[in-house]
Image (tube, rainbow, N blue to C red):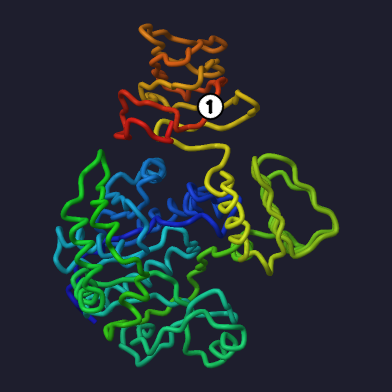
């Protein structure tokens, strides 16, 4: 079928609550930023996968404003510098996010074809993915809203299903959608598998921007009106586009499935086989796409086993030893350890709910916290003191700032530091140190070509990260914030 089609505009959705893969993922560090399968993070794998496609426009990425620098750094580190990062002031689910991307894509081409991808999925067969997208492109050019369905190989109860309708005669894998089905129980899932005309709903989509916006206007006009206002009043901030907070906050929150796909009569299903796809919705799902040993164990990090079978065992910092167990998930991080039966791994979010209810930071952040200039990691803390390891990237600097409630000692252990301390500016080499008195204006900079590493000892009556008054900042952050 020869159809003149526009280029593909990839849209990557980078939201996420960080609950399903706790303790490795957190509220401030969701699973798309983690290297769960392979050396790159799931986000990096998603954007690198686009390199296998032809006729592709620059990427549009929708992200939480609090994770903007992490997103930008992950893209930069794999050489992805063309594209737009759009910041949501609040989470409003996928339908408004895709609408914002569609409005931006139309600025280049009114009939732009969008390829909408979650940032946290695994696709192991890049060639099959490229072929699938080309089929989807042809179907989308016909004015259809394409959803990609995964041919099921077992009666999975964790996915929504799509029942296919009549063939659209495109590559033998494109169909009209008969209906969408919510996550079934085991009995219904087994029946779907036997009938053979159901696919898992992958959460990947393809359509023309104008068709999606027309269907959103038809079924959810208030949502489109608020998103349009948020885009039109958006502000450029460094390399980011900030959606207008007031307009976007007033936008209804709905998924693209519920707001559009389940209501439209223009939907189409393109079936995917041999894609090697997983949404990694649980630790058990991750174990299925992770290399295993002869006893079906996934062993990552410093792990010792004896008489162990069918376990996912991951160590991030310390040695983990397992003896005489099976069907378990064990994940060790610097500040938390998860032990779960594989059959219950989808209930990890219940632990996160308990942590949130108790106001504990382990649900939100790791001991190591990433910032645009580098990172800091808690090492020790006690009454009126805490110790951190700070790493500053070459050429980067922290803001010029002061603290009302704490003093700080800085000891350089690697690299060279340029320090503003009150009215003095000094250079510190390895094994040299300085003292920052309470209330003194100060700044830390790495003027060298290697990472700067130092130990910071804080002492005082209050040691919270919100005890910062910023005078100058290179990253557009507000004067008083919880970001160091």
- Image vertical order of residue 360 relative to residue 112, above or below: above
Q: Quadrant of the C terminus?
A: top left
Residue at image location 43% in from the left, 9% down from the top: 427
**Residue 404 makes an appearance in the image:** yes
Residue closest to the eye, 423 or 374 = 423
Residue closest to the eye, 23 or 145 = 23
State left or right for residue 287 relative to residue 416.
right
Residue 434 percent across, percent down from the top left: 50, 10
Residue closest to the eye, 242 or 33 = 242
**Residue 314 makes an appearance in the image:** no
- Residue 479's image quarter? top left
**Disc 1 target residue:** 462
Residue closest to the eye, 30 or 154 = 30
- Within 10 angstroms of label 1, few (less than 14), some, or many (20 or more) residues? some
Q: Quadrant of the N terminus?
A: bottom left
Q: Of helix, strand and loop, which one carries label 1?
A: loop
- Image vertical order of residue 448 relative to residue 278, above or below: above
Residue at image location 54% in from the left, 15% down from the top: 409
């Amino acid at each position: 079928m020869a159809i003149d089609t526009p280029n593909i505009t990839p849209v990557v959705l980078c939201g996420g609550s960080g609950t399903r893969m706790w303790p490795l993922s957190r509220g401030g560090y969701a699973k798309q930023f983690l290297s769960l399968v392979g050396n790159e993070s799931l986000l990096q794998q998603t954007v690198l996968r686009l390199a296998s496609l032809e006729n592709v426009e620059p990427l549009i990425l929708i992200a939480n404003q609090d994770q903007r620098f992490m997103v930008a750094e992950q893209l930069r580190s794999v050489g992805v510098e063309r594209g737009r990062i759009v910041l949501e002031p609040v989470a409003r689910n996928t339908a408004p996010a895709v609408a914002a991307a569609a409005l931006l894509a139309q600025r280049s081409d009114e009939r732009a074809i969008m390829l909408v991808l979650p940032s946290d999925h695994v696709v192991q067969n890049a060639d099959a993915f490229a072929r699938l997208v080309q089929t989807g492109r042809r179907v989308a050019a016909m004015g259809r809203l394409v959803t990609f369905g995964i041919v099921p190989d077992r009666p999975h109860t964790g996915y929504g299903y799509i029942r296919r309708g009549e063939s659209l005669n495109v590559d033998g894998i494109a169909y009209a959608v008969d209906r969408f089905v919510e996550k079934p129980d085991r009995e219904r899932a087994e029946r779907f598998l036997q009938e053979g005309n159901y696919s898992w709903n992958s959460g990947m989509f393809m359509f023309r921007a104008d068709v999606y916006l027309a269907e959103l206007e038809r079924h959810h006009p208030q949502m489109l009106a608020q998103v349009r206002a948020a885009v039109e009043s958006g502000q450029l901030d460094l390399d980011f586009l900030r959606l207008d907070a007031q307009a976007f906050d007033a936008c209804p929150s709905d998924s693209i499935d519920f707001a559009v796909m389940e209501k439209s009569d223009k939907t189409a299903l393109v079936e995917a086989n041999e894609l090697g796809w997983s949404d990694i919705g649980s630790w058990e799902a991750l174990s299925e796409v992770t290399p295993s040993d002869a006893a079906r164990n996934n062993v990552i990090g410093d792990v010792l086993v004896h008489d162990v079978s069918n376990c996912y065992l991951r160590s991030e910092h310390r040695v983990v030893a397992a003896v005489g167990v099976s069907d378990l998930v064990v994940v060790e991080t610097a500040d938390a350890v998860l032990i779960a039966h594989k059959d219950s791994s989808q209930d990890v979010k219940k632990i996160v709910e308990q942590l949130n209810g108790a106001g504990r930071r382990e649900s939100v952040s790791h001991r190591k916290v990433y910032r645009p200039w580098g990172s800091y990691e808690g090492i020790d803390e006690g009454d009126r003191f805490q110790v951190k390891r700070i790493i500053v990237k070459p050429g980067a600097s922290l803001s010029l700032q002061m603290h009302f409630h704490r003093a700080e000692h800085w000891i350089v252990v690697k690299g060279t530091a340029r320090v503003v301390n009150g009215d003095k500016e000094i250079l510190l080499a390895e094994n040299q140190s300085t003292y920052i008195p309470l209330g003194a204006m100060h700044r830390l900079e790495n003027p060298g070509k290697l990472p700067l590493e130092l130990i910071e000892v804080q002492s005082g009556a209050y040691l919270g990260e919100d005890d910062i008054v910023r005078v100058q900042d290179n990253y557009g952050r507000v004067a008083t914030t919880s970001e160091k």
